[in-house]
Image: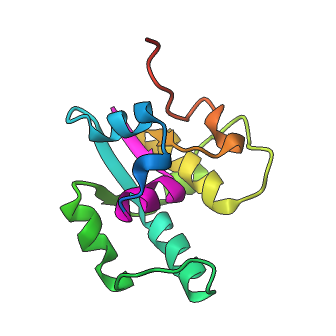
Amino acid sequence: MRLLLDTHIALACIQRQTGSLPTAMTDAIDQPENTIWVSVVTIWEIAIKSRLGKLPITFDMTLLPELLHRMGFGVLPVYAQHVLADINPIPGHKDPFDRLFLGICAAEGMRLVTKDRALADHPLAWRPLPS
């Protein structure tokens, strides 16, 4: 399965703070048959929040793409089809990053790994397999 990590999940992985994530989620991220992706949108969001002082970053931001690659995560650029993709139903909130994550999933055949309640029930969100 192709999985796209939202920014909060990607940050937890980068900072090695996955203890707060559900076990099924970390298991899915660790499964070798799953390919894990982080969008350049995540890098952008981290950079914005870091520059505004809303997110303390303890590493050199310019090294983030290489760090993600070393973690085995692909970094996906933003393409026009991501912006234009049908993401119905439209999420109730207006966060453009979240809408773009869903557009990426729709265009690329991915599932969004998120704990965001506004997105977790979306048809494009990843869900654990039933036990």
Q: Residue at left 46%, top 25%? A: 128
Q: Residue 121 at what x, y percent from top left?
A: 66, 31
**Relative to 17, 54 lies left or right:** right
Is 27 contained in the magenta span?
Answer: no
- Magenta span: 1-15
Q: State the residue in front, 116 or 96.
A: 116
* Residue drawn 33% across the image and 61% down it: 75
Work out which residue is located at the far top of the displayed protein and give it.
131
Residue 2 counted in the magenta span: yes
Check the picture and name the quadrant holding the N terminus.
top left
Q: Position of residue 74 (x, y in %)?
A: 28, 56
In the image, residue 111 sits, relative to residue 84, either above or below, namely above
Location of residue 106 with respect to 73 vertically, above or below: above
Residue 46 lies left or right of residue 121; in this view the side is left
- The residue positioned 62% from the left and 36% from the top of the image is 120
Q: Determine the residue located farthest toward the front in the rendered image.
A: 19
Colouring used for the render: rainbow
Extreme residue toward the right, this view = 92
